[in-house]
Image (cartoon, rainbow, N blue to C red):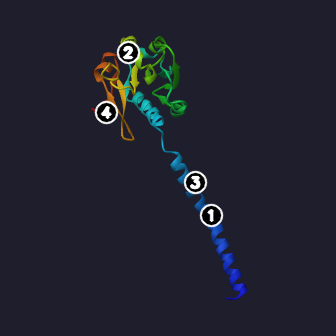
């Protein structure tokens, strides 16, 4: 093969590589993003909390004004870290902007929360917490064993790598909360 023909082939191969490189780069980037975008357990649970809020109806007295914030509280150690805030950022339910609060006292949750995630760190105080919230319209959610049997409303359940949930409809109804049949149908028994 002549030197000029070899030189022409190398140039053509270089042109092809340079032409295809911009097309290949986004594919590599999307593979990396896909691997990075595997949601963590608490990112999934944060999304579930948002959906619980969308598929439960609160009595009108639960909101001071039409545009009052819908508050999701976390009582005890916060396993979500910043995932819950990121998930709820710039979202609304009806006319209610969503807000996240870390709650230290049950009394705060009674008057300042619509949905309360009760962390496993509060296991020893659970009966006291649920008793205090009994007369309020606060949707209680946790991942503690026997949570719904003890009087909590929604319990996260892990089935392998999937996040599922159980619902205690009677407790929610007694608090004046109406759980959508769509949400009830997705709950595990």
Q: Is residue 71 above or below residue 89?
A: above
Badge number at residue 29: 3
Residue at which label 2 appears: 130
Q: Residue at x 28, y 20 (%)?
A: 170
The span from disc 3 to disc 4 (Cα, nearest Å) is: 36 Å
Q: Residues within 10 Å of mark 3 (few under 14, many from 20)?
A: few
Q: Position of residue 42 (x, y in %)?
A: 47, 34
Query: CB under 8 Å between callouts 4 and 1?
Result: no
Query: SS class of the residue under badge 4?
Result: loop
Give how far apart the Cα atoms at labels 4 and 1 are.
47 Å
Residues at marks 1 and 2, CA–CA distance in whole angstroms = 59 Å
Q: Position of residue 1 (x, y in %)?
A: 67, 88
Q: Quadrant of the C terminus?
A: top left
In the picture, measured across the screen, residue 15 lies left or right of residue 160, that is: right
User: Disc 3 or 4, which lies upstream in sequence?
Assistant: 3
Q: Residue furthest front?
A: 124
Which mark is in front, 2 or 3?
2
* Gap between marks 3 and 1 measured at Cα: 12 Å
Residue linked to disc 1: 21
Left/right placement of residue 5 relative to residue 187 reads right
Residue at label 4?
187
Graded by Cα atoms within 10 Å as few (under 14), some (14 to 19) or many (20 or more), the crowding at tag 1 reads few
Specify which label sits upstream in the sequence, 2 or 3.
Answer: 3
């Amino acid at each position: 093969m002549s030197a000029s023909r070899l030189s022409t082939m190398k140039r053509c191969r270089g042109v092809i590589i340079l032409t295809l490189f911009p097309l290949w780069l986004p594919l590599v980037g999307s593979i990396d993003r896909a691997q990075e975008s595997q949601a963590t357990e608490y990112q999934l649970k944060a999304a579930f909390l948002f959906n619980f809020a969308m598929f439960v109806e609160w009595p009108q007295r639960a909101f001071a004004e039409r545009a009052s914030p819908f508050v999701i509280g976390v009582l005890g150690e916060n396993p979500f870290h910043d995932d819950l805030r990121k998930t709820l950022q710039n979202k609304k339910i009806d006319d209610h902007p969503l807000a996240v609060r870390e709650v230290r006292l049950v009394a705060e949750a009674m008057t300042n929360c619509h949905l309360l995630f009760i962390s496993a760190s509060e296991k020893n105080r659970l009966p006291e917490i649920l008793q205090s919230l009994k007369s309020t319209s606060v949707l209680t959610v946790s991942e503690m064993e026997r949570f719904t049997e003890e009087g909590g409303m929604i319990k996260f359940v892990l089935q392998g790598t999937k996040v599922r949930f159980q619902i205690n409809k009677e407790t929610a109804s007694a608090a004046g909360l109406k759980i959508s049949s769509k949400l009830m149908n997705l709950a595990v028994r």
